[in-house]
Image: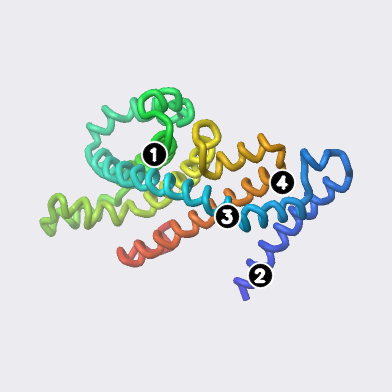
Amino acid sequence: MGKIVKVLKVISSLALFVGIWELIVLTGRYEPSLLPSPVKVLEGMGELVKDGTLITHFKVSLSRFITGYAMAIITGISLGLVLGYNKKVWEFVEPVVQLLRPVSPIAWFPFIVLWFGIGDVPAIIIIFIAGFFPTLLSTVSGVRKVDPVYLNVANNFGIRQPHLLFKIILPAAFPMIANGLHIALGTAWVFLVAGEMVGAQSGLGYLIIDSRNSLRSDLVLAGIIFIGISGLVLDRLIKLLEGYIERQWGVSEGRR
């Protein structure tokens, strides 16, 4: 019953959004070329699916995203575990991290192009930068907040490194790490699209720019909707993985 109510709320929310959109179009305040109707955008989505354009660009974007995101979370979690456990080293590194963290990955783009050229690599590096800092900081914070009781018990049982790190600290810090993975996924997906809009010849970001250059605002909005749906699906997949790992480690939902 609860799931049915939840589904009805989602449908009602989306229907309200589309209704407001259609009402704005019906006012005639905006030219159809500037704000196409929901039906026109739906037709555009069908066109992109039918001719294979969507699948082609989506596969490129997904490949870049998986590569960059995987690099970011592996590096961020590994460094975060080490830096979070070694307080003195983290105090030395933190000023540099806090200095670089607010810099938009797009700001690095001129140097990235100069160093790595044009192609998949610049987009992958932008995704890596976007996903690395949230993962690193959440991991460090998670490790620093591990209950000292766990560490004392581990010490009494004679558990030493690396078992202490991987058997005690990592599972205890995982809820915060998981939060970082969700944040990293969102920022990485956003900057993937941004990177493809300014320096790529393929991908969902390029699809939007190419549609704009062709004065197809319906395809622009169709691309935006596909990007939103893709990001939502990826976030759900991360949540499923998170739940699986928590069950394996016996991390209760109530701790979050």
Q: Which residue is mark 4?
A: 218
Mark 2 or 3, which is nearer the eye?
A: 3
CA–CA distance in space, label 4 to label 3: 17 Å
> Which part of the image, by quadrant, shows the C terminus?
bottom left
Indicate the quadrant containing the N terminus: top left, top right, bottom left or bottom right.
bottom right
Q: Residue at x 37, y 65 (%)?
A: 244
- Residue type indicated by callout 3: Gly
Identified at 46% across, 50% down, the residue is: 62
Q: Position of residue 153 (x, y in %)?
A: 19, 57
Q: Which residue is mark 3?
A: 52
| Mark positioned earlier in the residue sequence (4 or 1) | 1
Query: Residue 152 in the image: x percent, y percent?
Result: 19, 53
Give SS at disc 3.
Answer: loop
Give the mark, 4 or 3, whose residue is nearer the N terminus: 3
Q: State the CA–CA distance, disc 4 to disc 1.
A: 31 Å
Residue behind mark 2: 5
Residues 98 and 64: in front is 64
Cβ atoms under marks 1 and 3 closer than 8 Å: no
